[in-house]
Structures are given as C-alpha cells and as structure tokens.
Amino acid sequence: MPQNKSAEKRIRQNEKRRTRNKAKKTRVRSMMKTLRATEDKAEAESLLDDVKAALDRLAGKGIIHKNKAANYKSKLEKHVNGLDD
C-alpha cells in the first residue's frame, strides 16, 4: 500500500500508462499480423508504410526498443519483397 498521496498518484498514473501502452502495442501487432497474411504485393506495400510508421511511433515514445522496431521493419520488408506481383 502506498504511504503518501504522491505514491497513490504515481500508482494511478502508471496503471493508466500501462493500459494505454498495451493497447498501442496490441494494435501494431495486429497490423503486422494483417500484413503478413496479405498475399497481394501492392496492398502489402501500402500496409507496410502504415506499419513502419506505427513502429516508429512506438519506438519514439519508448514503448518498444528502437532496435526491436528496426528488426520488425526489416523482417516485414523482406516479407513484402518476397511476394510476387
């Protein structure tokens, strides 16, 4: 149990941020899953731009590490480049 008001507030803030960050991560993971399931190269390329932008936003806010975002982007890029027209 928190011993003072500032500790109580910190707990409330941390919980809000945790749920917000979790929702953002889940949304991006779903976008990546959709991209991997796409067979059409043109559609995949347009989705790739959105996913890369979302990953950059997560990395910029510190929700995921910047290297992890780079690894995801690289793997998704390879996937899209491997699709036939």
Image: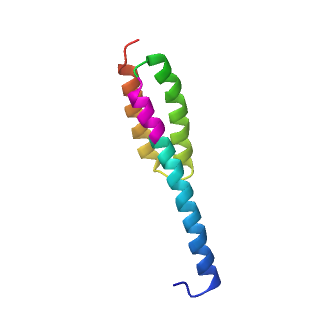
Main SS type for the magenta part?
A: helix
Task: State the image coordinates of residue 32 (x, y, percent, origin top left).
Answer: 44, 36
Q: In this view, does 76 lie to the left or right of 4?
A: left
Task: State the image coordinates of residue 46 (x, y, percent, origin top left).
Answer: 53, 24
Question: At 48% across and 36% down in the image, what residue appears?
Answer: 31
Task: State the image coordinates of residue 52 (x, y, percent, origin top left).
Answer: 51, 35
Q: Is residue 64 above or below residue 16?
A: above
Quadrant of the frame with the C terminus: top left
Q: Is residue 50 left or right of residue 34?
A: right
Task: Identify the image's colour scheme: rainbow, by chain, secondary structure or one colour.
Answer: rainbow
Task: State the image coordinates of residue 62 (x, y, percent, origin top left).
Answer: 52, 53
> In the current view of this chain or complex, which residue is farthest to the top?
85
Residue 36 included in the magenta stretch of the image:
yes
Question: At 46% across and 40% down in the image, what residue appears?
Answer: 30
Question: At 58% across and 63% down in the image, what residue appears?
Answer: 16
Magenta segment boundaries in residue numbering: 30-38
Q: In this view, does 16 lie above or below 41?
A: below
Residue 8: quarter of image:
bottom right
Residue 44 included in the magenta stretch of the image:
no
Q: In this view, does 84 lie to the left or right of 51?
A: left
